[in-house]
Image (cartoon, rainbow, N blue to C red):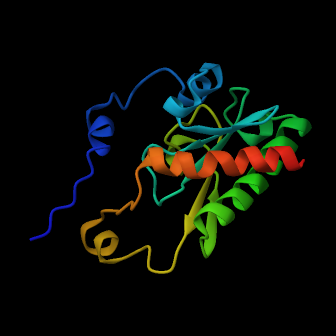
């Protein structure tokens, strides 16, 4: 029998799933980008690694302003979020070389939003075979790299892309 260790999941298992504070607002106000896994900040949005990823390099892009849906965002905020998504695609392509991407927005808890009060976009790099037997049979995902290592791989890409603007 093989044993898969995923000690980073324990924090989630033991966490308060009904927490009242907003993880994205915490990221916005924090100066500890590495501790909060924030790989990029633009004028009106932030990019962070998902602590509980579907795949290696799973990012979330959120507007800085705390709003529930895209309908509440101003034109400049929407433009900034989507320009930031483009940067994410480029940074992930350069650093992880995925074969594709899933991008999605879940608005409201019944639609699958884990953080329903602060709209955000998920960008998940996809690789051939990333839905292997573990996902199909055991409903378990295998993430091949520590979040801290993915952070160190992605952060310089965003710095370079910001300079190229």
Q: Nearer the viewer, residue 91 or 80?
A: 91
Image location (x, y in percent) of residue 113: 53, 44
Q: Residue at x 30, y 77 (%)?
A: 133
Q: Residue at x 66, y 33 (%)?
A: 68
Q: Is residue 52 left or right of residue 133?
A: right
Q: Is residue 132 above or below residue 41?
A: below
Image location (x, y in percent) of residue 150: 51, 51
Q: Nearer the viewer, residue 50 or 104?
A: 50
Q: Quadrant of the N terminus?
A: bottom left
Q: Residue at x 69, y 57 (%)?
A: 91
Residue furthest bottom as drawn: 128
Residue furthest left as drawn: 1
Q: Is residue 129 visible?
A: yes
Image location (x, y in percent) of residue 129: 44, 80
Q: Nearer the viewer, residue 95 or 43?
A: 95
Q: Is residue 128 above or below residue 84?
A: below
Q: Residue at x 63, y 45 (%)?
A: 155
Q: Is residue 106 visible?
A: no
Q: Is residue 126 left or right of residue 63?
A: left
Q: Is residue 142 above or below residue 77?
A: below
Image location (x, y in percent) of residue 18: 39, 27
Q: Is residue 21 left or right of residue 83?
A: left
Q: Is residue 96 left or right of residue 91?
A: left
Q: How many marks are shown on the rendered structure?
A: 0
């Amino acid at each position: 029998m093989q044993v898969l260790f995923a000690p980073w999941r324990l924090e989630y298992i033991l966490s308060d799933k009904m927490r009242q504070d907003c993880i994205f607002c915490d990221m916005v106000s924090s100066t500890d980008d590495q501790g909060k896994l924030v790989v990029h900040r633009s004028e009106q949005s932030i990019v962070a690694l998902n602590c509980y990823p579907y795949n290696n390099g799973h990012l979330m892009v959120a507007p800085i302003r705390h709003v529930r849906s895209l309908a509440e965002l101003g034109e400049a905020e929407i433009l900034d979020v989507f320009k930031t998504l483009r940067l994410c695609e480029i940074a992930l392509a350069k650093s992880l070389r995925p074969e594709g991407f899933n991008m999605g927005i879940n608005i409201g808890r019944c639609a699958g939003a884990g953080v329903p009060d602060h709209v955000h976009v998920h960008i998940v790099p996809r690789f051939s075979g990333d839905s292997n037997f573990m996902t199909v049979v055991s409903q378990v995902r295998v993430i091949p790299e520590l979040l801290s290592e993915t952070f160190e791989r992605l952060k310089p890409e965003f710095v370079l892309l910001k300079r190229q603007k």
